[in-house]
Amino acid sequence: MKFNKHLEDIKTYEAGKPIELVVREYGIDAKDIVKLASNENPYGCSPLVKNSVSDIVSKMALYPDDSMFKLKAALSAHYEIQDENIIIGSGSDQVIEFAVHAKASLGSKILMNSITFAMYEIYAKHVGAQVIRTSAQEHDLNEFYKLYLEHKPEIIFLCTPNNPTGDAIDAKELFDFISKIDNDTLVVVDGAYMEYSAYKDENKKVQPRELLEKFDNVLYLGTFSKAYGLGGMRVGYGISNSKIIKELYKLRPPFNITTLSLEAATVALRDKEFVNKCIASNFEQMKRYEEFAKEQKIDIIKSYTNFVTLCLNDSQNSSHLSRELLKKGMIVRDLSSYNMNAIRVTIGTKEQNSRFFELFLEII
Ligand SMILES: *Cc1c(COP(=O)(O)O)cnc(C)c1O
């Protein structure tokens, strides 16, 4: 059978291995497995969420509120924007899909960083768009601008802080860059880890409201999967001017967010104290990784997120190390598919991190 030829050279997205798989494949007890592979919040979500979602059981027979009124109201209050500026996706992943399908088609060009979130390329290929990448490891906006002038892409993806490297763009530089971009190019600012960078460094804090005020061609992305601890609920959102949001809505399947997920996200947004506590612990624990890397003479990329990227020495091999860690019940992300001899480790709880250091030393 022949399939859409655009799909031919797509490598299927490789998600972080779930704990259940390691139980099955390695026969390790679930309680002995630590997953530091997908940048989830190791402290889970707000206890308020657990209390509120139990009420949902009685509403399961009915379709969700497709207007997503409560969640949109919560987000518009949180960001001081209007409902018409918001679209909710099944993860911000789905909003990336909407954006690419809305703006790009066969022969379009999409500009992104050399190393960045893998889904941008996968969605680009769905529509037969050509991917243009910078060469620098971290976002170099001068290089982005040069490539922009040369290619006039339909879409530019900026991921700040960037996954899987953890570095972040200065907000001022970002605004200067976008102001030079023509209105017909859609600039996507993926802020999946913005809660972390905003906490760590005011200069790296990009506010969607400011983007909205200044630009008509920017789509900001946020998610409940990382700082809010709701990876399993699949809720993300896009913020943009109402004309762009209207276009994206044309691609949205009805009821794309379940009642349970809508409720969980709405309540999670209320508990700012919980999220702040998690983020503070995250950066406390990050210091231990920085010290560990220093002791082991391994390069660590300065991170504004809830993960660290450890660039291994030539005598070490990231695939081998990840495999050995896995056998011992420790799931991390091997970055060899990004052509980096590096692993990405989500910063866990104090105990999880200690376990990582211990196992790392056992193997090396
Ligand atoms: C995790 C992540 C997302 C999307 O996560 P969802 O779970 O789909 O909301 C988007 N961009 C980046 C860079 C991410 O790391």
Image (cartoon, rainbow, N blue to C red):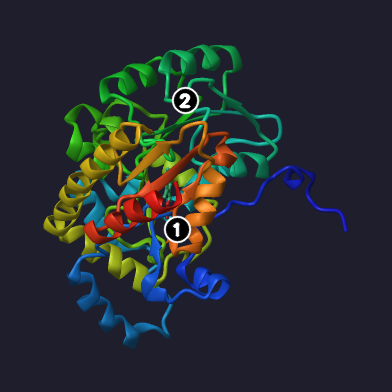
- Please provide percent x and percent y for residue 289: 28, 43
Residue 228 sits above or below residue 289 on the image: below
Q: Residue 339: which quarter of the image?
A: top right
Question: From the viewer's perspective, is 256 left or right of 347?
Answer: right
Separation of residues labelled 2 and 1 (CA atoms): 25 Å
User: 117 or 262: nearer the eye?
Assistant: 117
Query: Residue lying furthest left in this view?
Result: 273
Of badges 2 and 1, nearer the viewer stands: 1
Please name the amino acid that badge 1 sits on. Answer: Ile
Quadrant of res 225: bottom left
Left or right? Give the position of 63 relative to 317: left
Mark 1 crowdedness (10 Å alpha carbons): few <14, some 14-19, many ≥20 = many
Residue at image point 27% right, 37% down: 290
Element assignment for label 2: loop
Q: Which residue is mark 2?
A: 137
* Residue 8 position within the rendered picture, expressed as x and y whole percent measured from the top left: 77, 45
In the image as oriented, which residue stretches furthest toward the right?
1
Q: What residue did someone put label 1 on?
A: 331
SS class, disc 1: strand
Q: Is residue 207 left or right of residue 247?
A: left
Q: Residue at x 56, y 46 (%)?
A: 319
Q: Position of residue 90 (x, y in %)?
A: 45, 59
**Which part of the image, by quadrant, shows the N terminus?**
bottom right
Q: Nearer the viewer, residue 74 or 84?
A: 74
**Residue drawn at (21%, 41%) of the image:** 287
The amino acid at mark 2 is Gln
Residue 57 figure quarter: bottom left
Q: Is mark 2 within 8 Å of ligand 1?
A: no
Q: Earlier in the sequence, mark 2 or mark 1?
A: 2
Q: Nearer the viewer, residue 253 or 315?
A: 315
At a point 50% along the width and 24% down the height, the residue shown is 184
281 displayed left or right of 194? left
